[in-house]
Amino acid sequence: MNEPDAHPPLPRRQVLRAAVVGGIAIYTASLGSRAYAALLDEMLLTAPAWNGRTDRLRFRIDGTSKVTGGKVFARDIRARDMPHWPQQQAHALVLRTTVADRLYAGFDLSLLGTDLKPDRVVTAAHLERDGLAFPAFYGEDILLPLGKTPAYLGQAV
């Protein structure tokens, strides 16, 4: 008599999803890097405990961190918190179009107070001026230039 398989085969979608997620993780944190090794040494990347009977996690992987006030989400992690990472970091905000049926006329930061204005603004004109070219994969305009119609909703300006 055949017993039911304790671990049914994974659906193809789950396998593909896991492969994509794994590929991104390897790309963002090279397995041979000192930073990645430090994460493992300091137990920042620990495998979750699985319940063998139900094939589910025994508890939420962020549960302990949440109740002890630790770092939980990626937004809680800063470069200075990571071993072997720089102590300084910068932030970027990408502005995107909300319509794609009219010419782009630029954006106005004059309403922002001096303490809220960005340290640096990068536009398509800056990229062109500095001769920065991106692979064709990204299309003709990685940042939408003044006077052009967006190629799609949400195109970066």
Image (tube, helix red, strand yellow):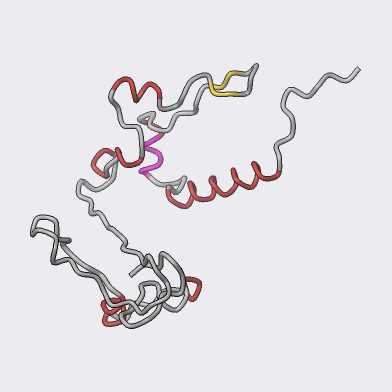
Judge from the rendering whether residue 153 lies leftward or rightward of residue 87; answer left or right: right
Q: Where is residue 121 drawn, in percent x and y?
A: 22, 68
Q: Which residues are magenta?
A: 34-39
Whether the magenta-drawn stretch holds residue 45 is answered as no
Q: Where is residue 90 drawn, in percent x and y?
A: 23, 54
Task: Please name the residue shown 28% across and 73% down the image.
Answer: 123
Occupied quadrant, residue 52? top right
Please say if 123 is above or below 118: below
Q: Nearer the viewer, residue 80 or 36?
A: 80
Task: Please name the residue shown 74% across and 34% down the image.
Answer: 9
Task: Please name the residue shown 28% across and 24% down the image.
Answer: 69
Occupied quadrant, residue 156? bottom left
Judge from the rendering whether residue 93 lies leftward or rightward of residue 60; answer left or right: left
- Secondary structure, magenta segment, majority class: helix
Outermost residue, right side = 1
Q: Where is residue 119 drawn, in percent x and y?
A: 15, 62
Whether the magenta-drawn stretch holds residue 36 is answered as yes
The C terminus is located in which quarter?
A: bottom left
Please say if 2 is above or below 116: above
Please say if 146 is above or below 68: below
Task: Please name the residue shown 54% across and 45% down the image.
Answer: 22
Numbered disc total? 0
The N terminus is located in which quarter?
A: top right
Outermost residue, left side = 114
Q: Where is residue 12 drawn, in percent x and y?
A: 70, 44
